[in-house]
Amino acid sequence: MDRRTFLQTTTRSAAALGTLSSLSAAPAPSKTPVIDTHMHIWSGDLGRFPFAHPYDPNLKPPPIAATVELLVKEMDEFGISHCVLVQTIYHGWDNRYLVQCLKVHPKRFRGHGLIDPTDPKVADRLEYWVREHGLRGMRFSPIYYEGKDAWLNAPASRALWRKAEDLGAIFNFFIATPQLPKLEEMVRSFPGVNVVIDHLARIDLKAADPSTEFKKLLALARYANVWVKVSELSVLSPSGKYPYADTFPWVRRMYEAFGPERLLWGTGFPGATRAQAGRPTLSEELNLIRKEIPFFTAADREKILGRNAAGLWGFEME
């Protein structure tokens, strides 16, 4: 990055934090936090909070609901200080349950909602949920729109990104690696919008040579406003066997490109819903970072497990 680009990025990033106070520039807390940056919850009260899956209207609720009560109990048991709640697709564009959880636990949670990226008024929807209900950002899922993802870098989407800069909103993307060049165009154009990539961009590690696609993720490391979640290794692993060591060489490449300061930890589901979704236990998820991935230093682990997220989302530590 040349000096001019660096100064532009710094200036625009600072301006973008006008509405939501100092998300990425917050000082690291003195107490080491443990922050799950990818937590899905959904209500068991389908009368108040009905399932409204926008892609599969016939989807049935899972047997066990991932309620906030279940989440808080597990957090307290395992010493998880904070979580970023990411709206589940089950409730569709209706973020009311997530907002209710934020109101009950405003210090422990930050929230990312869902809004329809193809809605002509998507920028207004972003402003509504951020200004009126305190969400810190939105999640977009281009992976569900493969072959129909022109909205990612469409001219009409620039209004959404400008609004995000004005609000200081964070975007996270559930995205496939072939779609990353379109996202890169927006990341480059809007350096004041902090962007988080979910699950190593779901790189297909079963491919004969994943390197070509993986380079599209590594290319985003040149942009200071991009973070990546070290998450869903159980899904990415060709063997599917804990601790998913066959993913470690790829995690290392990402670690070397982005540095430990822009990696985040997240798991997905609370309590018994982990097994329901076929995911590792919380103990296993914690130990992946704390013990199993061999090239993380002690300082790296603190950053990935919480310090990076505390700065990015502005969590207040007591």
Image (cartoon, helix red, strand yellow):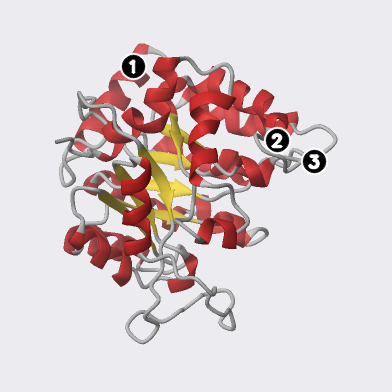
Instruction: Give whichever of 123, 98 is nearer the camera.
Output: 98
Disc 2 crowd, CA 10 A, few/some/many (<14, 14-19, 20+)? some
Kind of element beneath mark 3 = loop
What's the amino acid at mark 3? Answer: Lys
Mark pair 3, 2: CA separation: 12 Å
Instruction: Please tell me the numbered disc located at residue 247.
Output: none
Kind of element beneath mark 2 = helix
- Above or below: residue 46 compared with residue 106: below
Mark pair 3, 1: CA separation: 41 Å
Instruction: Give whichever of 213, 33 is nearer the camera.
Output: 33
Where does label 3 land, which residue?
206
Kind of element beneath mark 1 = helix
What's the amino acid at mark 2? Answer: Glu
**Does residue 177 appear in this view?**
no
The quadrant of the picture occupied by the C terminus is: top left
Image x and y of residue 289, in percent: 50, 29
* Residue sitting at x 77%, y 41%: 238
Mark pair 2, 1: CA separation: 30 Å
- Above or below: residue 79 compared with residue 272: above
Where does label 1 land, which residue?
4
* Residue sitting at x 65%, y 58%: 146
What's the amino acid at mark 1? Answer: Arg
Instruction: Please tell me the numbered disc located at residue 213.
Output: 2
Q: How many marks?
A: 3
